[in-house]
Amino acid sequence: MKDDFLNKIKTLISGSSKLNKDGINKEQNNVDEELVNSFMNQIMDAAWLEEDLKTMHAPSYRLSKKEKSYWLMNTTIKTMSNIKGGIEIIPVSTGKPNSICLIGQSMYSIPNNLIICSGWN
C-alpha cells in the first residue's frame, strides 16, 4: 500500500503519467492532480509558517539584576518609577548614556550599563 502511494508521488513529481491497457486513465489523473494540489498547499503553508517564525527571531533584553529594583524615568508620563531588576525590556532607540526602552506599555530611559542581552528567542 505504501509502495503504491510512493510510486504515485514519484510519478507525479517526475511529470510522467502511468499508462494502462486502455491509455491514460483520466479519472486517476484527476485524483492525482488533487493529491498534488493538496501536497503543494501543505508545502506552501509550511513555507509561510517558517517565514513567520523567521521574523519572530530577535534578541531578548532584560534589566540588570545587580540591584533588586531601579528608579527609572518614565518618559511617557515624565515621572520616576521603581522597576524590578530582571524584567524584560524592548529597546526602541539607543543613545550614548541612556537608551529608550519599552517596559509594558510605557517608555523608559534606561542607562546602557543596566541593559543585558539574555540571548535570542
Image (cartoon, helix red, strand yellow):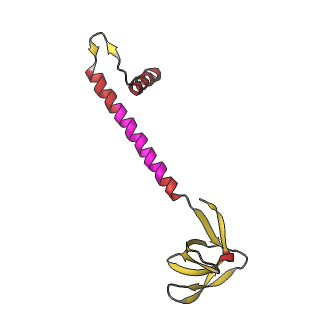
Q: Which residues make up the magenta segment? A: 35-51
The image position of residue 47, as x and y in percent, is 45, 45
Lateral position of residue 81 relative to residue 40, left or right: right
Q: Is residue 41 above or below residue 11?
A: below
The residue under the point 46% across, 23% down is 2
Magenta-drawn stretch contains 37: yes
Give the number of marks: 0
Q: What x and y, as percent, mark residue 59?
A: 60, 63
88 or 120: which is nearer to us?
A: 120
- At a point 67% along the width and 81% down the height, the residue shown is 69
Where residue 85 appears, x then y in whole percent?
Answer: 66, 76
The N terminus: image quadrant: top left
Q: Residue 93 or 87: which is nearer the viewer?
A: 93
Q: The C terminus appears in which quarter of the rendering?
A: bottom right
Residue 101 falls in image quadrant: bottom right
Q: Residue 97 lies in what quarter of the image?
A: bottom right
Q: Is residue 90 found left or right of 35 in the rendered image?
A: right
Left or right of 109 on screen, residue 50: left
